[in-house]
Amino acid sequence: MAMINFLILPILVPLITAVILIFLNKSVIAQRWVSGLSAFVTVILSALLVNKVKNDGIQTLNLSNWDAPFGITLVSDMLSALLVLTTSIVAFACIIYSFKGIGEAREKHHFYAALQFLIVGVNGAFTTGDIFNLFVFFEVMLMSSYALILLGGTNIQLRESIKYILVNVISSGLFVIAVGYLYSVVGTLNMAHIAERISEISGISQPGVISIIGIIFLIVFGLKGAIFPLYFWLPGSYYAPPAPVMAIFGALLTKVGVYSIIRTYSLFFYEDGGYVQQVIMILAILTIIAGIIGALAYWDVKKIIIYNIIVAVGVILFGVSTMNENALTGSIFYLIHDMIIKAALFLLVGLMATISGTNNLKQMGGLIKNYPGFSWTFFLAALALSGIPPLSGFVGKVLIVQGGFSSEYFIGAAIVLASSLFVLISIMKIFINGVWGEPKTYANEKSVPYKQLLIAPVILVILSICYGVGADFVYPYISQAAESLINTNIYIDAVLKE
Amino acid sequence: MKTSNVILQSMTKVLLFLIMIFSIYIFFAGHYTPGGGFVGGLLTSGAILLLLLAYDLQTVRNILPVNFLYMVAVGLVFAIGTGVGSLIFDKPFLTHAFGDIHVPILGELHLHTATLFDLGVYLVVVGVTMSIIQTIGGDDE
Amino acid sequence: MEILMIFIAGILFMSATYLMLSRSVVRIILGTTVLSHGVHLLLLTMGGLKRGAPPLVGEEASAYTDPLPQALILTAIVIAFGVTALFLVLGYRSYKELGTDNMEKLRGNDGND
């Protein structure tokens, strides 16, 4: 098979699958088989891609044979490849869960096709090396997310999707404006080329305009990634769709925003004298605090996990903003951990809500008696989320805190440390009230296909445990990813072939 | 509600074909001059929309018994297919090929695979536009 | 010319903001379309306005208009077209299902005590 095109396969396979799925809308069984198989193939291909990047260095592909920086270039460095792999795994798990967990009505209305288009958008956004193409892949991702959030058309979905679409339309507008400003300053759209031009410019003239563009980009990606004042839309919108969609959104969409902040910040805005860096750091700390307040305040299981997304975004961005090798490695470690474990938790919480017929913790209890498998999986996921060693959250947080202390950002590092404790409290609240206690009987619990629904979260939790225990094995990959962020010349040279 | 639209209906019978022909012209003109699949597709949907305004949705469904969502998918097949073609020759994705081919009767033709891509765009645009119009317009009955 | 275009873009943004702050869903959707027009105009202006030279030229042209902003705008227009269409369908559906197009009534605090 064509080798120079290898890095596009994790984008192309879901795209082709989505088209096939549109034709198959009559047969639910065929749709399940095709989307499950395709997701599995995507996982294998992205794993091979990670291996290829490990052995041969950064992969680039100049679409339509236009040389960089004139055409659109796709770039797979280690960070992109790892995130594409994680995305494919999470998508695979969510598709398996959807077989029993989404309902035939939605399956017949192109649920799987929309999901595959979403994967196209997410994998594309992770892989592209062109700032405007990033916008296009964002839109592919958003359009499919509109379809997914609307699918089913219950009242709450209609109501929340109006707000969701409005917020994203505004942020897309700002994105185009930011690209326009950037283009007028540097005259190119290729990200590696932009980075080169910016370092030329900031040598001679004022870097102020670069800082302003940096802040606009931060607003755009912050809206997607749910950082401090811009997360307001997230709890309502993510609450509306059913569990598998929520898992995909919570695990992937915010992380695309976070990835874009990491990528643009490390390439463009690092040399502006630390202004953008300070803003990101302060916002990251506030994000952690805001997320914790929400996670502790609610008694609704879904809301608790949703606010935990916001905490994680803050933790990752704090690590990034220190721009110190340890913390950056930790951030990437934590980013991948968080994608896996959030997907697992959303699926578990969805299962919990399906069994008990309510989202309210006060009306649940004693699930451990009839559902021990679920309960212990949830327990492990909860420990992994809050970073208890040797589970997967631990390594990332230790590195972030270490990096924070060594760069003398004591307050931030202390807040990251303290956040683990609060995250543990918030998640243990679910465990103590929902899983322990007096067993209750629920009206519809007999009809829930409990065992089939448990498969996907169990896969993810096992993976998360392996990720934590096998940190030694994973570390070289992660540090290679961090290296091309710290030393951006590696990235730039690979794209521009200098 | 339904009023007699004799003028509109008679004009539509003529204009529909004029717009259609113009949209096909625009589609092929797009290769070197302004035009292309997107504009051509919009013009075609405009023509179908005119038919819908003059008559009703049922007439449109009788004349064009197409599931427009499938039309989108077929368009995507064309667009992706021309891109995937380059994978087989180990060229970067979406690399297009062109050449002069001698066809009997028509003579020398300059053929380009980008036209097939544009045909995909055309079908996607018509499909999407008509699906949207059907979704909103189909609710009156 | 650039200055004038920037002012027009500013006026479009202003109208868009005003429309989007209103309560009616239809006005909000109109606001988003006006916003996208403003964005596209700004993008065109940012690419630099030149007159009298076509963007498609041979290799030895002395002056030409930068074609890239126009290509970007075309892409952005197509995307805005799709999103607006979807938004309109959604607005219509939610008006039928929820019986209101007033954002005040779509707050959704009912479930959370």
Image: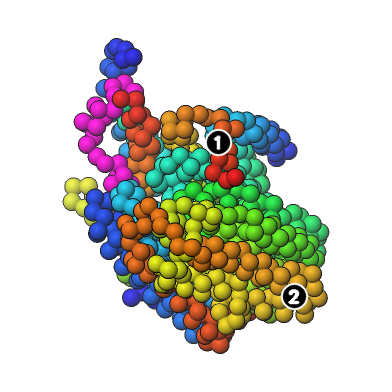
Mark-to-mark CA distance, 1 and 2: 43 Å
Q: Looking at the picture, how far across and down is residue B51, in whole percent?
A: 30, 26
Write the start and end of the magenta stretch as one range.
Answer: B53-72
Q: Nearer the viewer, residue A408 or A482?
A: A408
Name the disc covering residue C106, or none.
1
Locate residue B70 relative to residue A10 in the image: left or right. Answer: left
Which residue corresponds to the image point at 71% horizontal and 70% vertical from the top-left? A418
Q: Nearer the viewer, residue C29 or B129?
A: C29
Name the disc covering residue A201, or none.
none
Residue A266 in view here? no
Which residue corresponds to the image point at 57% horizontal and 83% vertical from the top-left? A390
Tag 1 and tag 2 share a subunit: no
- From the image, which quarter does the N terminus of chain A lie in? bottom left
Q: Is residue A394 above or below residue C106?
A: below
Q: Which residue is mark 2?
A: A404
Tags 1 and 2 in contact by the CB under 8 Å rule?
A: no
Q: Looking at the picture, how far across and down is residue A301, in whole percent?
A: 53, 57
